[in-house]
Image: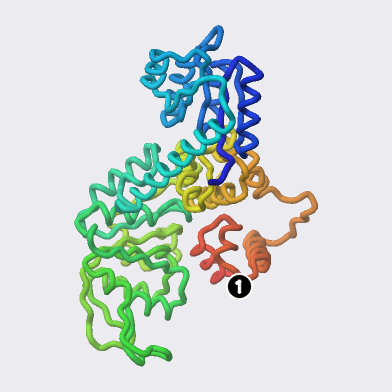
Amino acid sequence: MKKGWPILVVDDEEVMSESMAAWLREDGYRVDTAANGQAALELAKKTDYAISFIDLKMPGGLDGIETMMEIRRLRPDASIIIITAYATVDTAIQAMKEGAQEYIVKPCHPQEISMLVSRILKLKKLQSENVILRKKISRKYKHHDIITKNPRMEEILALTQEVASLRSTVLICGESGTGKELVARAIHYSGARAEKPFVSVSCAALTETLLESELFGHEKGSFTGAEGQTKGKFELADSGTIFLDEIGDISAKLQADLLRILQERRFYRVGGADEVSVDVRVIAATNKNLAAEVKEGRFRDDLYYRLNVIEIRIPPLRERREDIPLLAEHFVQTIASELDKDISGISGEALKVLIDYQWPGNVRELENVIERAIVTSHNGTLVDSDFSWLTQRGKPGQDWDVPDVPLSELERRAIIAVLERKQGNVKEAAASLGIDRSTLYDKLKRYEIAH
């Protein structure tokens, strides 16, 4: 198995402490040492150690059992191994009763330590994988899987429960990457349609003609390459939910077609003569101000009012920073497992870097940042240096002479430069710019940039 897990050795005997640390480092683990219980607690506050070896008898202050109990208060899932030169049945029973995972007697042998650590870490890895697997086996997007302790988000989650079983249209507003689709899925899977299809469509990623065919399907021969009848997303979502992401980007014609579906629950396939009836709940999402779009004449007011029966506004991540540690720990566990990287957590200093960052790409950007850190990290815990590049993001270089042009032209040039650097890969360009791919497609269309 991969190494790099952080391990703590607590012993007042320096020779014993350094010897054990040296053995473990030879096996590839990252090891910290502490000479007493209080020093161990200070280290445990900053790092989630995979295993802590704690001497039972330490003069002054906290003894081994007390140190173990305090660490377990900080880290309930901590694996503690008590070591002592004075083995008795009573001390063994007390240690195990108070939460020690193992109990070993001095003098310790390197081979014994290696085998013990390997066995415990394999078990911890399996436990982590099982937790993730259980979440995947249970429906991934259930209401309780949205991670938050922000009061505004908790109000939103309560509202999703209230409207889950209604057929009313929902409009979810928020910046790119805030989790609009996750909220849409929470609504769908919490209601009466949970066992029916949930179909997602990105309205910004397709041209008008392709999006029309994608939504409504087409008949054989309706356009070049239409070799047979194809059902659209509305038909596929029949009796379930269709999620229309970036609804503010659809054309005037598609706005009219969508209005008819919302009013009559019927439509025609492209090139078709027969009406198709569907029972579909519509949940739409946008990162635009649709009310302003209506005033500017770019969005139909009647469609806006049809969509905006129930409005949910998701706050950006920078307005709910208390969620960043929760989300970061969640992403570390899931991504590390998917990438088969033995990374057990994230340090307090690293969390401070993440909390201080502005997150223009919101939760999606946070997930991408965590993945990059996991890929490049050589430790068992993510530390602040794994995110050093993040603090430089958005800072202009000293030799950059800002041209005297409108802000929109600066944005256009930046997009072209990133696309060239990413060899036309829109997904990678969007990640580099810290925006959603659908938002980048919208900007490509707006600035008439070929890709």
User: In which image quadrant can residue 217 be found?
Assistant: bottom left
Name the spot of residue 124 as percent of width and height, x first. 44, 39
**Looking at this view, is 14 or 150 the one in front?**
14
In this rendering, the count of numbered labels is 1
Does residue 409 appear in this view?
no
**Looking at this view, is 24 or 317 the one in front?**
24
Q: Amino acid at mark 1?
A: Ile
* Residue 43 located left or right of residue 69: right
Q: Is residue 363 above or below residue 84?
A: below
Name the spot of residue 157 as percent of width and height, x first. 31, 45
Does residue 112 appear in this view?
yes
Q: Residue at position x 30%, y 53% from top?
A: 139
Q: Is residue 316 above or below residue 65?
A: below
Q: Residue at position x 42%, y 69% from top?
A: 203
Mark 1 sits on what residue?
449
Q: Secondary structure at mark 1?
A: loop
User: In which image quadrant can residue 208 be found?
Assistant: bottom left
Number of residues whose C-alpha sits closer than 10 Å to that of mark 1, classed few (under 14), some (14–19) or many (20 or more): some
